[in-house]
Amino acid sequence: MDYYLQTLLIAGIFITLTLSLNLINGFCGQFSLGHAGFWGAGAYASAVYTVFYALPVPGPINMLIAIVVGFIAAAICGLIIGVPCLRLKGDYLAIATLGFGEIVRITIMMTEKVGGPRGFINIPHLANIFWVYAVAAIITLFMFNLKRSAFGRAIISIREDEIAAENMGVNLFKSKLFSFTIGAGIAGIAGALFAHTQQFLHPSNFNFMWSVIILVMVILGGQGSVTGSVIGAVVLTLVPEILRYIGGTIAEWRMTIFPILLIILMLIRPQGLFGAHELHFKKSGGA
Amino acid sequence: MNQNFTFLLWDCLQYLINGIAQGSLYALVALGYTMVYGIIRLVNFAHGEFLMIGAMCGFYAIRAHLPMPIAIIVAMLSSGLIAVIVERLVYRPIRKSGRIPALITAIGTSLFFQYFGQLTFGADPKTIPPFIAEKIYNFGEVNVSNVQLAILAIVLLVLFFLWWLTHYTKIGKAMRAVSFNLEAAELMGINTNQIISFTFFLGAALAGLGGMLMGYTMSIEPMMGMNLGTKAFVAAVVGGIGIIPGAALGGFIIGIAENLVAGLYKSSFRDAVSFFILIIILLVKPSGILGKNIKEKV
């Protein structure tokens, strides 16, 4: 039972993370490879709050404050990284964000107060699966509305063609920076939830490979598709577990089968499962 | 002059020498990144894994009592062949789908080989003996080993070979033409698929050589490709990705900076310093030290 609960919990956290990266990568078209850095910054900042500076208020309120702390810390990181880096484009932006993500992780590793390379222990168990899915639902709604708002349309136009968007009066730098900061902040929220459900943080949870996995979830679902992100996150969390469940040789080789499935998906359907489309639950809904 | 200051200078010189030796290995790996990027604009994340495969095959060749030079050739050939197979099966079909699917595919390939390596070679670290018997020469307070000198010589030789290859042979000219404009080169009658395969082979073979030479400082294990690959990639970008001398320059810069920081300040900053250099270079001159600026047109 614990195992299923844990898998569901991780899937919920990854829904939030994937949505936050989709805002940067899918909507705005800015290729970021350092998302795990923001996730880590949020997780550690919120844990520092609840472990060292917690206010004498009931747990759920403290959890709310921790989420806000995680959001602010990660958003500030996003702002600091975004201002210099968003002048870059394409591959170069990807590399610069990769570098910043690694620097965040190495800085955490060097900070003795949060355990350094030993990991951060004794984080209170404030959040549970309801928190995780409530936040995921709120973020999903937020993304749906953002996509249809004027700002959402502006950043999608940046993805399609920067020069054309600029000519239509979109402030490129401001819009990019805003989506980058908000995206980083939401990753920080996912970090706060991760810290307070797992109760243990380790810098290697936030290395480059995890940035890549979040990115793959976005691409699998389809860049710019909100429902796609949700499904991408759930599928990619469950597939390795299902392969493990089958047992025998497949369980042993699951970590090699998983990348093969990924490559086959890219060969057959490079735009992801949904492309930029949404899954409709009622016929009349337009997106 | 103050005595402490003299010791500091000697120390710096020692770190500089170690840095040059290590940097030349990064340069060797960075060359593969830069050649592949130059020709098809793909950041080949699986390049570090080619290095790992080369080193592993070389290790088994040595364990089968093959002499060192043959083991090195085995390592280079095996990583080169794996790269050609990967290119044929995976990268070639994905090339038309655009850059981001290609990047994801490269990441997938890298993951596949990491776990494949763990299952077939085992996750335990293995050691490759140094390729020549190590002798240490003393110059004042500074130690230089003949292995370091040999590595530097090999890397310089490789660089010279690549310069000769790209400028004075038919296949080298074809490589330059493909990297300049793939479609135009195809129209001129160049078999671009063959050239791309050859580039992958060459880059991966150099990575395999690098993997073998690295045996003198570190043990080899299936996950080694990730860390080394990222650093070599950073080196390629710092020097100017797509430019062969740039990769070498970047490799030396990263190697020297790492050793100076680890020696003079804190060894835990070793991994961070390459990223700091990367970000500074990207902010000042995004196309790299030797790169040219390309303006985007409407």
Image: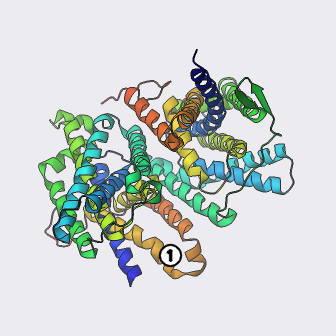
The amino acid type of the residue labelled 1 equals: Leu
Q: Is B218 placed left or right of A69 in the picture?
A: right
Left or right: B146 in relation to A219: right
Q: Could you say which is closer to the camera, residue A114 or residue B277?
A: A114
Could you tell me residue B224's position as x and y percent?
60, 52
| Residue depicted at x 65% and y 33% | B18
The image shows residue A27 at horizontal and vertical percentages of: 26, 51
Q: Where is residue A2 shown, x and y percent of the image?
A: 39, 81
Residue at the image point whose x is 28% and y is 59% from the top = A52
Q: Quadrant of the N terminus of chain A?
A: bottom left
Q: Is residue B226 visible?
A: yes
Image-quadrant location for residue B191 = top right
Residue that numbered label 1 is attached to: A243
Q: Residues within 10 Å of mark 1 (few under 14, many from 20)?
A: some
What kind of element bears circle 1? helix
Residue at the far bottom: name it.
A1
